[in-house]
Amino acid sequence: MKVMKNNNWPLAKTATIAILTALAFLGTLLIRIPIPVSTGYFNIGDIFVMVAGLWLGSRAGLIVGFLGPALADFIGFPQFILATAITKGFEGFIVGFIGGGTNEKSITKKVVAVTVGAITIVIGYFIFEVYIYPWLGTFVPFFAVTDLSAAIAELTPNAMQGLISAVVAISIWKAISGFNLEKNTNTENQLEN
């Protein structure tokens, strides 16, 4: 007797999310270009956050964005874990929500999605650096690492990081968009009793 199991999250998708999370971690950890007027840095981890959202949807984008870059901040920049997890998690979610998933083929939606993702990086970090971290720093000195002048100085590097990530993510998506991890290409969803 065959029993069909409804599995909307196949093993291949889980493995791909794990790989993209690792790539986002490595892209954030290994490519760190310091921004001299602040305690921040330029990195390429957002490429993989955006790819996850574009290719696999909002849930995958959220997971990759929340985990990969934030874990990289744990090594050397732990004060930014909170800002990174929330900003990059939302970035991945919104990219996936607007233009993500294997069934969405519209290049216009994909471009809009990564553009909104890039804007999310800029606005998210600006809000954390101008409002949230200074406020948290009044209670916990660990968070007193930034102010308005540093946040303004990071606008251009964060915008460049978002723009570069968006362009590269669209290019990667175009190269891999034919791979549909939602399809059941083997008997992964079938169980025999």
Image (cartoon, rainbow, N blue to C red):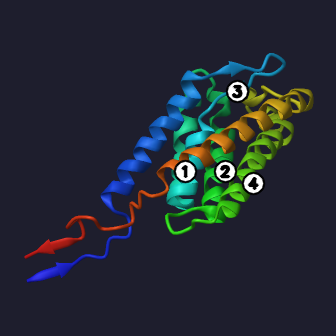
Q: Which residue lies under the disc numbered 3?
A: 42
Which mark is first along the chain, 4 or 1?
A: 4
Q: Are marks 2 and 1 in contact (CB under 8 Å)?
A: no
Q: Are marks 2 and 4 in contact (CB under 8 Å)?
A: no
Which mark is first along the chain, 4 or 2?
A: 2
Q: Are marks 1 and 4 in contact (CB under 8 Å)?
A: no
Which mark is first along the chain, 3 or 2?
A: 3
Which mark is first along the chain, 3 or 1?
A: 3
Residue found at x 53% / y 37%: 24
- Depth check, mark 1 against mark 4: the one in front is 1
**In the depicted view, which residue is nearer to us: 122 or 175?**
175
- Depth check, mark 1 against mark 3: the one in front is 1
Q: Could you say where residue 74 lies in the image, as x and y percent from the top left?
A: 56, 28
In the image, taking residue 22 as reference, residue 57 lies left or right, namely right
Q: Could you say where residue 122 lies in the image, as x and y percent from the top left?
A: 79, 42
Q: Is residue 108 above or below residue 162?
A: below
Q: Could you say where residue 171 lies in the image, as x and y percent from the top left?
A: 59, 45
**Mark 3 element type:** strand
What is the quadrant of the C terminus in the image? bottom left
CA gap, disc 2 and disc 3 = 16 Å
Q: Which residue lies under the disc numbered 2?
A: 91
Residue found at x 51% / y 69%: 103
The amino acid at mark 1 is Trp
Which mark is first along the chain, 3 or 4?
A: 3
CA gap, disc 2 and disc 1 = 16 Å
Q: Is residue 2 above or below residue 71?
A: below
Q: Which residue lies under the disc numbered 1?
A: 173
The amino acid at mark 4 is Val
Residue found at x 65% / y 29%: 43
